[in-house]
Amino acid sequence: MDTSNANSVIYEVKFIILITLQIPGILLMIFIFLFFTLHPYTLKKLQNQALFILLITNSIRLIGTMPMPIDFYRRGYIFLATSAYCTCWTFLEYSLAVIGEYLMATISVQRHVTIFHPNIFQTFKKSILFFYLPLAFSVAYPIIFYVYAVLLYPCDGAQWDYSIIACGYMNCYYNNNKLAVFDWVVHNILPIVVIILANVTLITRVIVGKLRRNQAIHWRQQRTMTLQLLSISSLYVVAWSPTIIVGLIQQATSINFGDVQAAYITDLIYLSCLLLPWVCLGQLPEFRKWMWKYMRWKRVKHASIAPL
Protein backbone atom coordinates (compact mmCIF):
# COMPACT_ATOMS: atom_id res chain seq x y z
CA MET A 1 0.00 0.00 0.00
CA ASP A 2 1.51 3.35 -1.06
CA THR A 3 1.60 6.44 1.12
CA SER A 4 -1.43 8.13 -0.44
CA ASN A 5 -3.61 5.03 -0.01
CA ALA A 6 -2.39 4.55 3.55
CA ASN A 7 -3.21 8.17 4.38
CA SER A 8 -6.67 7.86 2.86
CA VAL A 9 -7.41 4.84 5.04
CA ILE A 10 -6.12 6.61 8.15
CA TYR A 11 -8.16 9.70 7.30
CA GLU A 12 -11.30 7.64 6.79
CA VAL A 13 -10.86 5.88 10.13
CA LYS A 14 -10.26 9.19 11.89
CA PHE A 15 -13.32 10.71 10.23
CA ILE A 16 -15.51 7.84 11.42
CA ILE A 17 -14.14 8.02 14.97
CA LEU A 18 -14.48 11.80 15.25
CA ILE A 19 -17.98 12.04 13.78
CA THR A 20 -19.12 9.08 15.89
CA LEU A 21 -17.97 10.85 19.04
CA GLN A 22 -19.01 14.36 18.04
CA ILE A 23 -22.72 13.86 17.29
CA PRO A 24 -23.62 12.04 20.54
CA GLY A 25 -21.47 14.56 22.44
CA ILE A 26 -23.45 17.47 20.99
CA LEU A 27 -26.76 15.80 21.83
CA LEU A 28 -25.66 15.11 25.39
CA MET A 29 -24.41 18.68 25.74
CA ILE A 30 -27.83 19.96 24.65
CA PHE A 31 -29.52 17.84 27.32
CA ILE A 32 -27.09 19.10 29.98
CA PHE A 33 -27.77 22.74 29.10
CA LEU A 34 -31.51 22.01 29.05
CA PHE A 35 -31.19 20.53 32.52
CA PHE A 36 -29.42 23.64 33.83
CA THR A 37 -32.09 25.84 32.22
CA LEU A 38 -34.95 23.91 33.80
CA HIS A 39 -33.16 23.55 37.16
CA PRO A 40 -31.33 26.86 37.75
CA TYR A 41 -30.99 26.12 41.45
CA THR A 42 -28.26 23.59 40.62
CA LEU A 43 -26.03 26.49 39.54
CA LYS A 44 -26.02 27.83 43.09
CA LYS A 45 -23.25 25.34 43.76
CA LEU A 46 -19.91 26.92 42.87
CA GLN A 47 -18.54 23.64 41.55
CA ASN A 48 -21.46 23.44 39.11
CA GLN A 49 -20.84 27.04 38.01
CA ALA A 50 -17.23 26.21 37.17
CA LEU A 51 -18.32 23.09 35.34
CA PHE A 52 -20.95 25.09 33.45
CA ILE A 53 -18.29 27.53 32.21
CA LEU A 54 -16.09 24.63 31.12
CA LEU A 55 -19.02 23.08 29.26
CA ILE A 56 -19.85 26.35 27.49
CA THR A 57 -16.33 26.74 26.14
CA ASN A 58 -16.23 23.05 25.25
CA SER A 59 -19.54 23.29 23.37
CA ILE A 60 -18.12 26.15 21.29
CA ARG A 61 -15.16 23.96 20.44
CA LEU A 62 -17.31 20.90 19.83
CA ILE A 63 -19.67 22.71 17.45
CA GLY A 64 -17.41 25.48 16.13
CA THR A 65 -13.98 23.95 15.53
CA MET A 66 -14.41 20.17 15.51
CA PRO A 67 -16.17 20.29 12.10
CA MET A 68 -12.90 21.61 10.62
CA PRO A 69 -10.72 18.52 11.28
CA ILE A 70 -13.71 16.27 10.61
CA ASP A 71 -14.20 17.85 7.20
CA PHE A 72 -10.47 17.64 6.49
CA TYR A 73 -10.41 13.91 7.20
CA ARG A 74 -13.53 13.42 5.07
CA ARG A 75 -12.06 15.22 2.04
CA GLY A 76 -8.37 14.58 2.57
CA TYR A 77 -7.58 18.25 1.99
CA ILE A 78 -8.63 21.71 3.18
CA PHE A 79 -11.53 22.75 0.98
CA LEU A 80 -11.26 26.46 1.79
CA ALA A 81 -7.60 26.98 0.94
CA THR A 82 -7.20 30.55 2.09
CA SER A 83 -4.97 32.24 4.61
CA ALA A 84 -7.99 33.69 6.40
CA TYR A 85 -9.52 30.24 6.94
CA CYS A 86 -6.27 28.79 8.29
CA THR A 87 -5.75 31.78 10.57
CA CYS A 88 -9.30 31.46 11.91
CA TRP A 89 -8.90 27.70 12.40
CA THR A 90 -5.66 27.92 14.35
CA PHE A 91 -6.85 30.88 16.43
CA LEU A 92 -10.04 29.09 17.50
CA GLU A 93 -8.29 25.74 17.96
CA TYR A 94 -5.45 27.13 20.06
CA SER A 95 -7.45 29.53 22.21
CA LEU A 96 -10.32 27.13 22.99
CA ALA A 97 -7.95 24.23 23.71
CA VAL A 98 -5.86 26.30 26.12
CA ILE A 99 -8.99 27.75 27.75
CA GLY A 100 -10.07 24.18 28.46
CA GLU A 101 -6.67 23.35 29.96
CA TYR A 102 -6.59 26.47 32.12
CA LEU A 103 -10.17 25.99 33.31
CA MET A 104 -9.45 22.39 34.25
CA ALA A 105 -6.30 23.39 36.12
CA THR A 106 -8.23 26.12 37.96
CA ILE A 107 -11.09 23.76 38.79
CA SER A 108 -8.59 21.19 40.13
CA VAL A 109 -7.05 23.71 42.51
CA GLN A 110 -10.43 25.10 43.54
CA ARG A 111 -11.84 21.64 44.22
CA HIS A 112 -8.83 20.93 46.41
CA VAL A 113 -9.47 24.13 48.36
CA THR A 114 -13.21 23.41 48.61
CA ILE A 115 -12.66 19.99 50.17
CA PHE A 116 -10.23 21.11 52.88
CA HIS A 117 -11.30 24.74 53.33
CA PRO A 118 -15.04 24.70 52.56
CA ASN A 119 -15.68 28.15 54.08
CA ILE A 120 -13.19 30.05 51.94
CA PHE A 121 -15.71 30.88 49.19
CA GLN A 122 -18.58 31.83 51.49
CA THR A 123 -17.81 35.55 51.68
CA PHE A 124 -18.44 37.72 48.62
CA LYS A 125 -14.91 39.15 48.43
CA LYS A 126 -13.22 35.77 48.76
CA SER A 127 -15.52 34.17 46.20
CA ILE A 128 -14.70 36.95 43.72
CA LEU A 129 -10.98 36.82 44.45
CA PHE A 130 -10.41 33.07 44.65
CA PHE A 131 -13.21 31.66 42.52
CA TYR A 132 -14.56 33.98 39.83
CA LEU A 133 -11.37 35.90 38.98
CA PRO A 134 -9.28 32.76 38.30
CA LEU A 135 -12.05 31.40 36.07
CA ALA A 136 -12.30 34.73 34.23
CA PHE A 137 -8.53 34.80 33.77
CA SER A 138 -8.58 31.24 32.42
CA VAL A 139 -10.99 32.34 29.69
CA ALA A 140 -9.69 35.83 28.90
CA TYR A 141 -5.93 35.30 28.94
CA PRO A 142 -5.67 32.63 26.17
CA ILE A 143 -7.91 34.72 23.92
CA ILE A 144 -5.76 37.83 24.43
CA PHE A 145 -2.52 35.91 23.85
CA TYR A 146 -3.66 34.26 20.62
CA VAL A 147 -5.21 37.44 19.31
CA TYR A 148 -1.67 38.79 19.35
CA ALA A 149 0.21 35.60 18.41
CA VAL A 150 -2.09 34.39 15.62
CA LEU A 151 -4.16 37.36 14.44
CA LEU A 152 -1.84 40.34 14.95
CA TYR A 153 1.65 38.84 14.64
CA PRO A 154 3.32 40.04 11.39
CA CYS A 155 2.73 37.42 8.70
CA ASP A 156 2.31 37.32 4.91
CA GLY A 157 0.00 34.29 4.95
CA ALA A 158 2.12 32.28 2.54
CA GLN A 159 3.30 29.73 5.10
CA TRP A 160 0.17 27.55 5.22
CA ASP A 161 0.12 23.98 3.91
CA TYR A 162 -3.39 23.20 2.68
CA SER A 163 -2.72 19.46 2.41
CA ILE A 164 -2.16 19.01 6.16
CA ILE A 165 -4.65 19.26 9.01
CA ALA A 166 -4.90 22.72 10.57
CA CYS A 167 -2.91 23.99 7.58
CA GLY A 168 0.21 22.39 9.04
CA TYR A 169 0.01 24.44 12.26
CA MET A 170 2.40 26.81 10.50
CA ASN A 171 1.78 29.98 12.46
CA CYS A 172 4.29 32.74 11.91
CA TYR A 173 4.90 33.32 15.60
CA TYR A 174 6.66 29.93 15.70
CA ASN A 175 9.54 31.68 13.94
CA ASN A 176 10.06 33.58 17.18
CA ASN A 177 11.75 30.86 19.22
CA LYS A 178 11.21 32.55 22.59
CA LEU A 179 7.52 33.13 21.92
CA ALA A 180 7.06 29.58 20.64
CA VAL A 181 8.74 28.07 23.71
CA PHE A 182 6.72 30.33 26.00
CA ASP A 183 3.54 29.21 24.27
CA TRP A 184 4.38 25.53 24.59
CA VAL A 185 5.57 25.64 28.21
CA VAL A 186 3.04 28.07 29.70
CA HIS A 187 -0.03 27.05 27.69
CA ASN A 188 0.44 23.31 27.30
CA ILE A 189 2.86 21.91 29.87
CA LEU A 190 2.10 24.16 32.85
CA PRO A 191 -1.68 23.54 33.13
CA ILE A 192 -1.24 19.78 32.80
CA VAL A 193 1.44 19.82 35.51
CA VAL A 194 -0.91 21.83 37.75
CA ILE A 195 -3.73 19.36 37.11
CA ILE A 196 -1.51 16.40 37.98
CA LEU A 197 -0.06 18.01 41.12
CA ALA A 198 -3.49 19.16 42.33
CA ASN A 199 -4.92 15.66 41.95
CA VAL A 200 -1.94 13.85 43.46
CA THR A 201 -1.82 16.13 46.50
CA LEU A 202 -5.60 15.91 46.89
CA ILE A 203 -5.59 12.12 46.85
CA THR A 204 -2.66 12.06 49.28
CA ARG A 205 -4.33 14.46 51.71
CA VAL A 206 -7.63 12.59 51.61
CA ILE A 207 -5.94 9.22 52.27
CA VAL A 208 -3.71 10.62 55.02
CA GLY A 209 -6.73 12.33 56.60
CA LYS A 210 -8.65 9.06 56.54
CA LEU A 211 -5.81 7.22 58.27
CA ARG A 212 -5.58 9.79 61.05
CA ARG A 213 -8.14 8.67 63.57
CA ASN A 214 -7.94 11.90 65.51
CA GLN A 215 -8.82 13.97 62.43
CA ALA A 216 -12.55 14.46 61.96
CA ILE A 217 -13.19 14.37 58.23
CA HIS A 218 -16.22 13.68 56.12
CA TRP A 219 -14.65 10.70 54.39
CA ARG A 220 -17.53 9.77 52.09
CA GLN A 221 -18.07 13.33 50.85
CA GLN A 222 -14.36 13.90 50.31
CA ARG A 223 -14.01 10.58 48.50
CA THR A 224 -16.91 11.43 46.18
CA MET A 225 -15.58 14.89 45.35
CA THR A 226 -12.08 13.50 44.83
CA LEU A 227 -13.27 10.78 42.45
CA GLN A 228 -15.36 13.32 40.53
CA LEU A 229 -12.36 15.59 40.06
CA LEU A 230 -10.09 12.67 39.20
CA SER A 231 -12.42 11.43 36.46
CA ILE A 232 -12.67 14.72 34.61
CA SER A 233 -9.05 15.83 35.11
CA SER A 234 -7.75 12.44 33.96
CA LEU A 235 -9.38 13.09 30.60
CA TYR A 236 -7.19 16.16 30.05
CA VAL A 237 -4.07 14.40 31.30
CA VAL A 238 -4.62 11.42 28.98
CA ALA A 239 -5.43 13.66 26.01
CA TRP A 240 -2.49 16.05 26.40
CA SER A 241 0.29 14.00 28.01
CA PRO A 242 1.35 12.02 24.89
CA THR A 243 1.90 15.22 22.89
CA ILE A 244 3.82 16.84 25.76
CA ILE A 245 5.97 13.75 26.43
CA VAL A 246 6.82 13.37 22.74
CA GLY A 247 7.70 17.05 22.54
CA LEU A 248 9.99 16.82 25.56
CA ILE A 249 11.72 13.73 24.13
CA GLN A 250 12.28 15.49 20.82
CA GLN A 251 13.72 18.52 22.60
CA ALA A 252 16.06 16.41 24.76
CA THR A 253 17.21 13.93 22.10
CA SER A 254 17.65 13.61 18.36
CA ILE A 255 14.62 11.30 18.05
CA ASN A 256 11.99 12.59 15.63
CA PHE A 257 8.39 11.43 16.01
CA GLY A 258 7.21 13.59 13.12
CA ASP A 259 5.13 11.07 11.17
CA VAL A 260 3.78 9.26 14.24
CA GLN A 261 3.01 12.53 15.99
CA ALA A 262 1.17 13.97 12.98
CA ALA A 263 -0.74 10.74 12.26
CA TYR A 264 -1.80 9.71 15.75
CA ILE A 265 -0.51 11.55 18.82
CA THR A 266 -1.65 15.11 18.11
CA ASP A 267 -5.23 14.02 17.41
CA LEU A 268 -5.52 12.60 20.93
CA ILE A 269 -6.01 16.19 22.09
CA TYR A 270 -9.47 16.11 20.51
CA LEU A 271 -10.53 13.53 23.10
CA SER A 272 -10.69 16.21 25.80
CA CYS A 273 -13.36 17.97 23.76
CA LEU A 274 -15.28 14.96 22.45
CA LEU A 275 -15.48 12.99 25.70
CA LEU A 276 -15.99 15.83 28.18
CA PRO A 277 -19.83 15.73 28.02
CA TRP A 278 -19.78 12.03 28.94
CA VAL A 279 -17.28 12.47 31.75
CA CYS A 280 -19.44 15.27 33.14
CA LEU A 281 -22.18 12.74 33.82
CA GLY A 282 -20.16 11.74 36.85
CA GLN A 283 -20.11 15.35 38.05
CA LEU A 284 -23.87 15.87 37.86
CA PRO A 285 -25.85 13.30 39.88
CA GLU A 286 -28.94 15.53 39.66
CA PHE A 287 -28.73 15.43 35.87
CA ARG A 288 -28.49 11.63 35.85
CA LYS A 289 -31.58 11.37 38.06
CA TRP A 290 -33.44 13.81 35.80
CA MET A 291 -32.53 11.85 32.67
CA TRP A 292 -33.55 8.57 34.32
CA LYS A 293 -36.95 10.02 35.29
CA TYR A 294 -37.40 11.40 31.78
CA MET A 295 -36.63 8.05 30.16
CA ARG A 296 -38.99 6.26 32.54
CA TRP A 297 -41.71 8.80 31.73
CA LYS A 298 -41.18 8.27 28.00
CA ARG A 299 -41.44 4.51 28.39
CA VAL A 300 -44.60 4.79 30.47
CA LYS A 301 -46.13 7.23 27.98
CA HIS A 302 -45.22 5.02 25.04
CA ALA A 303 -46.70 1.96 26.78
CA SER A 304 -49.94 3.83 27.58
CA ILE A 305 -50.56 4.83 23.95
CA ALA A 306 -49.42 1.54 22.41
CA PRO A 307 -52.24 -0.34 20.64
CA LEU A 308 -53.73 -3.26 22.55
Image (spheres, rainbow, N blue to C red):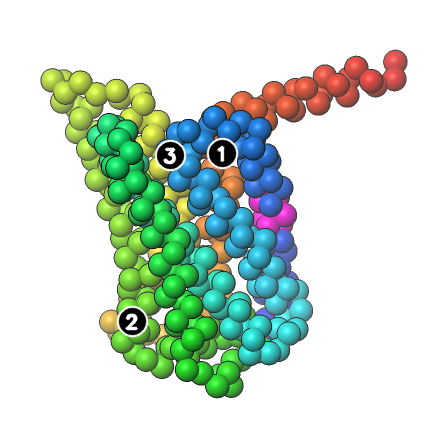
Residue 282 in which image quadrant: top left
Q: Position of residue 284 (x, y in %)?
A: 47, 30
Q: Position of residue 233 (x, y in %)?
A: 37, 44
What residue type is disc 2 on? Val
Q: Secondary structure at mark 3?
A: helix
| Mark 1, residue position | 281
| Mark 3, residue position | 47
275 to the left or right of 291: left
What residue type is disc 3 on? Gln
Crowd class of label 1 (few under 14; some 14 to 19; many from 20; radius 10 Å): some
Residue 97 lies in the magenta stretch: no
The residue at the point 59 percent across, 63 percent down is 68
Numbered badge on residue 296 = none
Q: Secondary structure at mark 1?
A: helix
- Label 2 to label 1: alpha-carbon separation: 36 Å
4 to the left or right of 151: right
Is the C-beta separation of discs 2 and 3 under 8 Å? no
Residue 130 in which image quadrant: top left
Which part of the image, by quadrant, shows the C terminus?
top right
**For the stretch drawn in magenta, what is the main secondary structure?**
helix
300 to the left or right of 120: right
Q: Secondary structure at mark 2?
A: helix
N-term mark: 3 or 1: 3
N-term mark: 2 or 3: 3
Seen from this angle, which residue lies furthest right? 308
The residue at the point 53 percent across, 69 percent down is 88
Residue 44 in which image quadrant: top left
Numbered badge on residue 181 = 2
